């Protein structure tokens, strides 16, 4: 289907416009009813309850050099316009439906091709390294973007602790999934648990953030509490939420959106204004709260830091 955006949609009608780029319409088009299959692993019995992992807890942070000098998006927009399909596929669903999501106790298992596999409690994750406030651009494949003061530290801190073996080439991530707490998930068309992946060198890049908070506090449930990834040079769907498992492995892991629509969503998913989505251009984006479009930047503006990870690769092929 060829989309003639300007002629079809009035600029001011941002709600309709975002709906147009929403991947949900694609899923509905396929007539997928949804498959609630695997229940995410939990280790609650191994732990004493965390006192610090609840949404809305103030966090003490240090300033980081990783900060773009751009207007920060309103907290209300960032916490009420979400993609978190486990809680429904409308942008307002996660804020409504994730309110009672139980995020404590919580354990993240880091395993696979590593010398010392470990299960980290949230209290451990919150104290492994100083928490940095990093201001990143975040660009969704649907052409909306935000600028967010995330809180966390480089994922490499955790990966180094478990000592990757020489066989480790990729990192697979898995989100929590519980159909009882997430009854809306089965109507969204995605298979759960949500999974994502990175090459090990991408995961070790200092910009790849293990994120525990935003706007000075622990993460709101709808933004991926209690711990998520933020990978600012990639489309937002790579930034997997509510992580329970991180597995180092020798082979490329499957990813939720690639599994769903392989011709539309590749493994790499680097932000690239020169490679269109099959159904829309990726040259521009709309910041939440603004009307006019911004030009989308190569690697979302992080070329200086990450372009070398992809030298010699055809980014059209490895999209
Ligand atoms: N993680 C899980 N588990 N489930 C999801 O549906 N959506 C992804 C990503 N991580 C998603 C997820 C998409 S498409 C985007 S754009 C970002 O989360 C959105 O993050 P935000 O809602 O905090 O802006």
Image: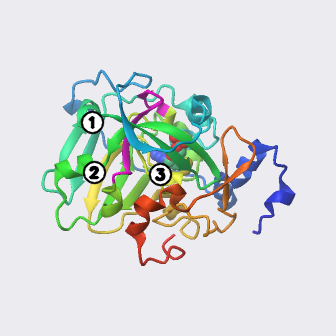
- Occupied quadrant, residue 59: top left
Q: Tell me whether circle 2 and circle 1 mark residues in contact (CB < 8 Å).
A: no
> Does residue 213 lie above or below 167 as drawn?
above
Q: Locate residue 119 relative to residue 259 in the image: left or right.
A: left
Q: Tell me whether circle 2 and circle 3 mark residues in contact (CB < 8 Å).
A: no
- Occupied quadrant, residue 243: top left
Q: Earlier in the sequence, mark 2 or mark 3?
A: 2
Name the outermost residue toward the left.
115
Provide the residue designation for mark 1: 125
Residue at 41%, 40% (x, y): give it: 242
Q: Position of residue 275 (x, y in %)?
A: 60, 69
Residue 227 visible in the picture: no
Under tag 2, what secondary structure?
A: helix
* Residue closer to the observer: 153 or 245: 153
Q: Position of residue 273 (x, y in %)?
A: 61, 64
Picture quarter with the N terminus: bottom right
Crowding near the residue tagged with mark 1, few <14, some 14–19, many ≥20 C-alpha atoms within 10 Å: many
Does label 1 point to a residue whose CB lies under 8 Å from ligand 1? no
Provide the residue designation for mark 3: 232
Provide the residue designation for mark 2: 156
Crowding near the residue tagged with mark 3, few <14, some 14–19, many ≥20 C-alpha atoms within 10 Å: many
* Residue closer to the observer: 121 or 236: 236
Residue at 69%, 59% (x, y): give it: 29
Label 2 to label 3: alpha-carbon separation: 15 Å
Q: Locate residue 21 relative to residue 229 in the image: left or right.
A: right
Residue at 51%, 52% (x, y): give it: 237
Crowding near the residue tagged with mark 2, few <14, some 14–19, many ≥20 C-alpha atoms within 10 Å: many
Label 2 to label 1: alpha-carbon separation: 13 Å
Q: Which residues are magenta?
A: 206-221
Q: Is residue 312 magenta?
A: no
């Amino acid at each position: 289907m060829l989309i003639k955006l300007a002629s079809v949609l009035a600029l001011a009608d941002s709600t309709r416009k975002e709906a147009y780029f929403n991947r949900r319409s694609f899923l509905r088009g396929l007539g997928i009813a949804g498959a609630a299959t695997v229940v995410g692993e939990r280790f609650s019995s191994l732990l004493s309850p965390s006192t610090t992992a609840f949404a809305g807890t103030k966090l003490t942070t240090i300033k980081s050099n990783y900060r773009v000098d751009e207007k920060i998006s309103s907290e209300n927009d960032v916490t009420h316009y979400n993609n978190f399909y486990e809680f429904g596929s409308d942008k307002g669903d996660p804020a409504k439906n994730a309110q009672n999501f139980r995020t404590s106790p919580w354990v993240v298992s880091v395993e696979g091709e590593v010398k010392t596999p470990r299960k980290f409690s949230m209290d451990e994750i919150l104290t492994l390294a100083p928490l940095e406030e990093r201001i990143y651009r975040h660009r969704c494949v649907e052409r909306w973007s935000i600028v967010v003061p995330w809180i966390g530290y480089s994922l490499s801190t955790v990966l180094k602790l478990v000592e990757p073996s020489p066989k480790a080439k990729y990192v697979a991530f898995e989100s929590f999934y519980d159909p009882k707490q997430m009854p809306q998930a089965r109507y969204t068309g995605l298979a759960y648990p949500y999974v994502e992946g990175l090459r090990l060198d991408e995961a070790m890049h200092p910009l790849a953030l293990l994120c525990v908070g935003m706007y000075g506090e622990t993460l709101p449930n709808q933004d991926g509490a209690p711990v998520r990834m933020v990978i600012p040079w990639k489309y937002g769907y790579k930034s997997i939420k509510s992580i329970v498992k991180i597995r180092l492995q020798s082979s490329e892991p499957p990813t939720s959106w690639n599994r769903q629509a392989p011709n539309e969503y590749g493994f790499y998913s680097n932000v690239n204004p020169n490679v269109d989505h099959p159904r829309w251009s990726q040259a521009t984006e709309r910041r939440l709260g603004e009307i006019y479009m911004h030009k989308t930047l190569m690697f979302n503006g992080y070329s200086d830091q990450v372009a070398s990870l992809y030298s010699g690769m055809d980014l059209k092929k490895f999209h």
